[in-house]
Image (tube, rainbow, N blue to C red):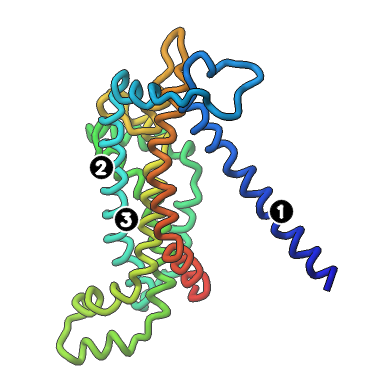
Amino acid sequence: MLLQRTKITFFYAAVWAFVVIVMFPFFWQINTSLKPPDQLYKMPPDWLPSPVYFGSYISTFTKHPFTIYLENSLIVATATTLYSIVMGALCAYAVARLQFRGKKLILMLVLSVSMFPAISILSPLYILLRDFNLLNTFEGLILPYTTHGLPLTIWILASFFKDIPAELEESARIDGTSRLGAFWRVIIPLAAPGMFTTAILVFIGAWNEFLFAFSFMSKDIMRTVPVGIAMFPGEHDIPWGDISAASVIVTLPLIVMVLLFQRRIISGLTSGAVKG
């Protein structure tokens, strides 16, 4: 009994130690964003800001085109998510339900594309987008982002679609519904947890992406949030307070979204794993 309690105590101690280590960088970002400028370089550093200073949050919006960066990121991430979910759902349905030659090969190719390091396809993509006049356009980011969003969507949703009983779809077709109608009216509602989980993962991936956005968006008004924050430092000044405040602003909505829908996300991921 004592040994069991000791194991449990060590387990929870290890979990809390892990949580503290993981959360410490974000805590320090919040702490830095609320410090007055004269405390940013103080050594040893203060663990808590005194007094609390909100000037960095104000200057983030007044000294930089941060609102434009937010709008650009929201447009690109939302469009990438919608495109990946719609196209990925159709592809996943074909993989899960239809029988055709080369299905396994297609899945292997989809998986291999998702494994490519982004830097290895950067130059070809840049030349391609330049020739099609897509540099500094939203389409020039949305299309490359789907090369990572689509494989993730296909693999997760295919697992969900495979586990949905085919009899439900057949019953709908007997009642006069077309194959596409059965897909939208029967399959999609039953796979909603998986689609919701996939949408969140694709959105977060597109929201945080830096390399493609930095390479394909050279105009300031077209930059996304990660690239815009990286451009905050001037020639003789690094505004750590503004950088920390901007990082907190773009991170908090993602944390709130994950906390609000954590049950659905976990349900979606674990269901896909079991059904796969």
Q: Is residue 273 above or below residue 117?
A: below
- Which x, y percent locates residue 51? 48, 23
N-terminal of the pair, mark 3 or mark 2, is: 2
Look at 36% across and 75% down and name the residue there: 100
Tell me how far mark 3 sits from mark 1, CA to CA.
38 Å
* Res 222 label: none
> In the displayed structure, does residue 69 sit left or right of residue 153?
left
Q: Judge depth for marks 3 and 1 and give the one in front.
A: 1
Question: How many residues crowd around disc 2 within 10 Å: few (fewer than 14), some, or many (20 or more)?
Answer: some
Q: Judge depth for marks 3 and 2 and give the one in front.
A: 2
For label 3, the residue is 84
Residue 272 or 200: which is nearer the viewer? 200
Residue 66 or 273: which is nearer the viewer? 66
Q: Is residue 242 above or below residue 126?
A: above
Question: Label 3's element?
Answer: helix
- Which x, y percent locates residue 172? 22, 87
Q: Mark 3 is on which residue type? A: Ser
For label 2, the residue is 75
Tell me how far mark 3 sits from mark 2, CA to CA.
14 Å
Look at 41% across and 13% down and name the residue there: 234
> In the displayed structure, does residue 13 sit left or right of residue 179?
right
Q: Mark 2 is on which residue type? A: Ile
